[in-house]
Amino acid sequence: FQVGDRVFFHHHVPCMSCRLCQRGQYTSCERFRRSGLDPGGFAEFVRVPAEIVQLDVLKLPDEISDEEAAFIEPVACSLRAFEKLSVEPGESFWAIGAGPMGLINVRLARYFGAEPIIVSDPVEVRREYARQAGADAVLDPKAPDFEARLAEVTGGWGPEKIVVGPDSVEAIEHGLAHAAAGAIVLVFTPTPPEATVAYHPHDLYFKEVTITHSYSAGPVETREALIASGELQVEDLITHRFGLEGVGEALRLAKLFDASLRSVIYPHGLSVEVKTI
């Protein structure tokens, strides 16, 4: 690397030598959980440990903008999830939750050929974002005709590949209850430690429904995401832009389900702060 290079760096890195890493389970590696940055991303300057520089710092090609590069880590997380889902062309895909990660998953589902692509979210603003992101069907899970609409969209079979975005037990149970026979239900966000999920093993057994999880991303996925971020449309998911002094407002907006999707921080200042979709 040289002074002036634009780079991406991951905030965690595995050891690449332990039993877990040898099996490709990078995010379960002890060093992955222990590693990190100092003092963090919301600063003019950040110290990146040597172990991260060696394994997961990528030089950005000229054709990828700074804002596209800001999506490498979230796209990498989604790519790891899609590897576990093994999405095939023509399979129905259901994203539960239309937050920024849900919409990235919608774009990736299209990238991998899933059809139809369904999104459900109780917040109208986010359902509109999902429509703009290219979902084939956008549903309100609280609507009285939700089950009928979901069945209609999937030809009566139910969704085959499901990503549960929200960190709620209700969302996980919702996905399991409506999964097609042979479906894979992937939990994308951790629940609170004390949470427990109620499900019917008898039903899942005879439907052969698989439950799996996906946490973060390793160096392999970040390299794949570097390519994908240049091919996927992601910049339109940015609803707000701030200078460093706007970090507090960006965090406040992130807590409001109907106020923003993704905010970008420019540590050295920005003349234009807000972009609306």
Image (cartoon, rainbow, N blue to C red):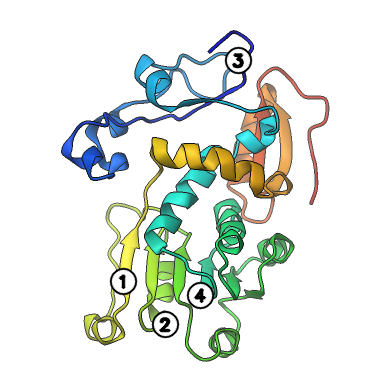
Q: CA distance from mark 3 to mark 1?
A: 44 Å
Label 4 vs 3, first from the N-terminus:
3
Q: Nearer the viewer, mark 4 or mark 1?
A: 4
N-terminal of the pair, mark 3 or mark 1, is 3
| Placement of 66 over or under 207, stated as above or below | above
**Residue occupied by mark 1:** 210
Eye-nearest disc, 4 or 3 = 4
SS for dot 2: loop
Q: Earlier in the sequence, mark 4 or mark 1?
A: 4
Which residue is more in the foreground, 61 or 43? 61
Please tell me which of labels 3 and 2 falls first in the chain.
3
Res 71 quadrant in image: top right
Mark 2 vs mark 4: give the one in front.
Answer: 4
Crowd band around label 2 with a 10 angstrom C-alpha radius: few (<14), some (14–19), many (20+): many
Measuring from the top left, give residue 55's x and y in whole percent. 38, 25
How far from the left and from the top, in percent, is residue 249?
66, 35
Q: Which residue is mark 3?
A: 44
Q: Are marks 2 and 4 in contact (CB under 8 Å)?
A: no
Identity of the amino acid at label 4?
Answer: Glu
Amino acid type assigned to the residue bearing label 1 in the image: Thr
Q: Looking at the image, can residue 53 be seen?
A: yes
The kind of residue tagged 3 is Glu
- Give the percent coordinates (x, y) of residue 200: 26, 81
Confirm or deny contact between disc 4 and disc 3 (CB under 8 A). Answer: no
Secondary structure type for disc 3: loop
- Which residue is labeled 4 in the image? 91
| Looking at the image, residue 207 lies above or below residue 189 | below
Mark sitting earlier along the chain (1/2): 2
- Distance between mark 1 and mark 2 Cα atoms: 10 Å
Q: Nearer the viewer, mark 3 or mark 2?
A: 2
